[in-house]
Image (cartoon, coloured by chain):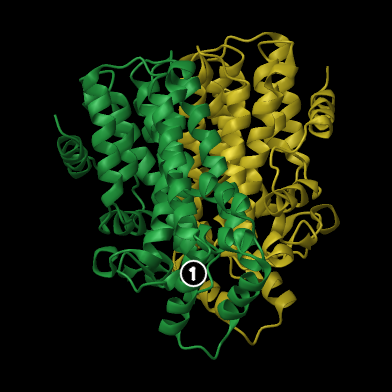
Chain colours: A green, B yellow
Amino acid sequence: MHIQDLQEAYLNFTKISKGDLEVSGLSLPIQYILSLKSKKIRPLLAIIGYRIFRNDIEKCMHAAHGLELFHNFTLMHDDIMDEADLRRGKETVHKKFGNNAAILSGDAMSILAYQHILKDCSQSNALDVLSTFSQTALDICIGQQLDMEFEERTYLTSEEYIKMIRLKTAVFLGMALQLGALIAGKNKAESTPLYEYGTNLGIAFQIQDDLLDLIGDQEKVGKMKGGDIIRKKKTILITKALEIAPPAIKNQMIELLHSDSVQPELKVLKMTELMTSIGLFEVIEMEIKAYFKKADDQLSLLNISDYGRDLLSQLSGHLQQRKS
Amino acid sequence: MHIQDLQEAYLNFTKISKGDLEVSGLSLPIQYILSLKSKKIRPLLAIIGYRIFRNDIEKCMHAAHGLELFHNFTLMHDDIMDEADLRRGKETVHKKFGNNAAILSGDAMSILAYQHILKDCSQSNALDVLSTFSQTALDICIGQQLDMEFEERTYLTSEEYIKMIRLKTAVFLGMALQLGALIAGKNKAESTPLYEYGTNLGIAFQIQDDLLDLIGDQEKVGKMKGGDIIRKKKTILITKALEIAPPAIKNQMIELLHSDSVQPELKVLKMTELMTSIGLFEVIEMEIKAYFKKADDQLSLLNISDYGRDLLSQLSGHLQQRKS
């Protein structure tokens, strides 16, 4: 079985699952955001976490869908906070339906997430499943708060940046895998390596995303090269660069970053040169490898079949192509 | 033991319970809204629901606090949606900290609510406790949505109004009582009469509030007489009045309600006269009695001690004085 089959099983499930809300004012924004194109990584991770241990994946579909609901709840509210007009190339919920609808439908989605997860719980695992989910849900809020606070700051350490992306995005991937395993009947200790695996994988891919923004194949990445630098986004690249650069180059970088007179494409080009000169990209590549290694180290702690290991390695490849 | 002792036990618990969030940007708004004066009815109800069956009330304090957190989460978001400047005589969270802080801290509070409730769950009751809580949490969102939709409507039936207040406020009271009982080890069927009891009590008190707004002792109620009529709020009074009034009086009422030339105090006086002329207040009193009766009918379904019955009757008296 390939993970494409697991994805398909999830998509079929969402097609037949009925709406839970009788009030259209609440459910239309939810249906809208769920209809936007997305890779649906989180439900896939939950299904993989379950499928590693059990065949009957139909018994974790609600929980998987709960994670997708929760993810979209965070997107809905983040878009209000960021005043974003577009999400996946379409109008954001608050632009289309208004702020109030986006706030309240988001709230409802977060509760619906719990309800869907509960549907796949049994008495023996509900406590573990729900506390694992809730802890990560809270971490995601803390990550979003850090992201907003960091935007106001002029300087950020690479460690702070990693902490933020760990909380805001990476732990969700780890939790999704672990949740699947918990629902499959594994206990917290047995399933924790999956959490660590997914989280470290998540960090590795986020750093890779940051790197690809600057030195990736432009067409493949699908957005303007160096967009993060032009928007002065404090990613791993710039935070790490300012840490390892000698004082003279560090000053040049800061000046260039905040200069309004340098034309954007030239700014990206010059910054790339400066970063190359201090060996930044090698350092970042090593960082990525270190997180992949941390993820892999967890695999030896897992008592799973070759089939399970194959699923996880397919997952790693699949995540590498993701852009969502 | 009086319910004042239960209230005090809860207040002592909140004093020693530490903050759960390391990020001050998230926790300051939460600490702020929790510090506003309030009767803390919902935790009290949960503790009563527990105390009816068990003595060791310290084992339900986290869950009780979870309900207070959830309630304040709804207030925080409702205030954004209603663009309210004041809450309990103080600045609302979004006025003081900004919309983004109120959105995100609210989100965190709703998750914290689940975490606190989970702390008092055992393997045997987690599934029932969490699904009972989640269902009501969703009902509250639906109630808030109906409230917003109803504000845009010119006409509302009294039945629609009751449906809205049931979902928006009453079911929370019923759920709080039931949650306490579930945590005390009762099963869903045994505890459902408490849910029905609290819900019907909640509706009765909301109708009573609406009535007191117009014909209550002004100083006791603590706000301007007939404020709902001046704000054209579609409460049980006006919805029911327009249903039972003969056509001529109905037209007079509608005209009066929407007239901008009649001075506010005179408007209230005239409306009161019209309402008196059709016997509205007797009808409303009967409605209130009917909901109290519905609540009382549930008591006979409950297998509880005289002590438990006494607690519930104290509760009923306590709720009658409430204004929060």
Q: Quadrant of the C terminus of chain A?
A: bottom left
Q: Position of residue A96 (x, y in %)?
A: 37, 70
Residue under the point 29% across and 69% down: A218
Label 1 Cα neighbours within 10 Å, binned few <14 / some 14-19 / many ≥20: some
Q: Nearer the viewer, residue B250 or A52?
A: A52
Q: Which x, y percent locates residue A28?
A: 32, 58
| Residue B315 visible in the shown view | yes
- Quarter of the image with the N terminus of chain A in it: top left
Report which residue position mark 1 lands on.
B250
The mark total stands at 1
Q: Is residue A39 left or right of residue B104?
A: left
Quarter assignment of residue B42 = top right
Q: Which element is circle 1 on?
A: helix
Chain holding disc 1: B
> Horizontal and vertical percent for residue A217?
28, 65
Left or right relative to A119: residue B50? right
Q: Give B87 or B224, whichever is nearer the viewer.
A: B87
Judge whether B128 appears above or below A141 on screen. Answer: above
Residue A119: which quarter of the image? top left
Please name the residue shown 80% across and 47% down the image: B35
- Going by the numbered disc 1, the residue's amino acid type is Lys
Which of B155 and A17 lies nearest the eye of the viewer? Answer: A17
